[in-house]
Image: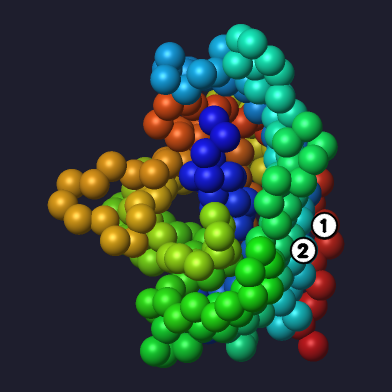
Amino acid sequence: MFRSDFASAILAWACFSGVTVGGASAASANILVPHRAVYDLELKDASERSGISGMYGRMVYEFNGSACEGYTVSFRFVTKVDTGEEVRLTDQQTTTYEDLKNGNFRFLTRSFTDEKLDKEVRGSAHGAEQGVKVDLTSPDKRQVDLARSLFPTEHMLEVIDRAQKGETLFESRIFDGSDSGDKTLITTTMVGKQRTPVADDGDAGKAGAMASKPYWPVTISYFNDDMTGDALPIYRMEFKLYGNGITRDLTMDYGDFVLTGKLADLEVFKQGDCK
């Protein structure tokens, strides 16, 4: 449970909520709706190896901004984990800023256990044709050059764009600042046929005006970028994705254990106009 890939998976999902670096146009990005979503989390399954006998919590995700001003994500993921011998409180807090026009990305993640800071990762990245240059300031000050990658909002736009075109399986390389902020991930995305919610469709009742809108069932598997052969994913996310970037009915599979996230509250904000 307290492995780095769990924290990375949390951030990967948060950041996920243009097909080339710096290439997403203002027009395509304007489909994304600023909003605040709250999800109730609970343990669906856990192996003996996980050491987890119970787990529950809450996730709050806030997405703001515009294509011309850039997008800001504020995210908090709090869980109580029962190992059978003790109960631990984990708290991950992340803020990111992404400038689609100029290909810039800033990130800050703080991870706490029982209200004590375990780790802070802070840095910025810039994407160009030749790759991604990362400037880290915490926990260590250093520079890293990585392969050409998508930043999180660009990845979201790519998934929506490909889903609208009817593509069902594709691969991408992303950089989201997760783990130690010094590596990229390979994602494999599967998109199901677009559906319209029904009365008993998971947490559709909490989706407000979105409850009757069509969505795509999406599964994204995350792999280390140095994978070879038939590698297993580090983690896998399943969710229902709307065309404006809102997600619900989450399943987060970390291998040793699986969490579900049900939409408890959704507030859609007024979208600003690009000037």
Give me the disc on residue 64. Answer: 2
Residue type, mark 1 in image: Phe
- In depth, the one of 68 and 186 nearer the eye is 186
The answer to whether residue 47 is left or right of residue 68 is: left
The N terminus: image quadrant = top right
Q: Residues within 10 Å of mark 2 (few under 14, many from 20)?
A: many
* Residue 41 vertical position relative to residue 218 in the rendered view, above or below: above
Residue 41 location in percent, x, y? 66, 27
Figure label count: 2
Query: What residue sits 58% from the left and 78% below the top?
Result: 142
Query: What residue sits 54% from the left and 55% below the top?
Result: 179
Residue 176: image quadrant is bottom right
Residue 118 location in percent, x, y? 70, 46
The answer to whether residue 158 is left or right of residue 71 is: left
* Residue 97 vertical position relative to residue 135 in the rendered view, above or below: above
Query: What residue sits 24% from the left and 46% below the top?
Result: 231
Contact? badges 1 and 2 (CB < 8 Å): yes
Is label 2 in a helix, a strand or a loop?
Answer: strand
Residue at label 1? 269
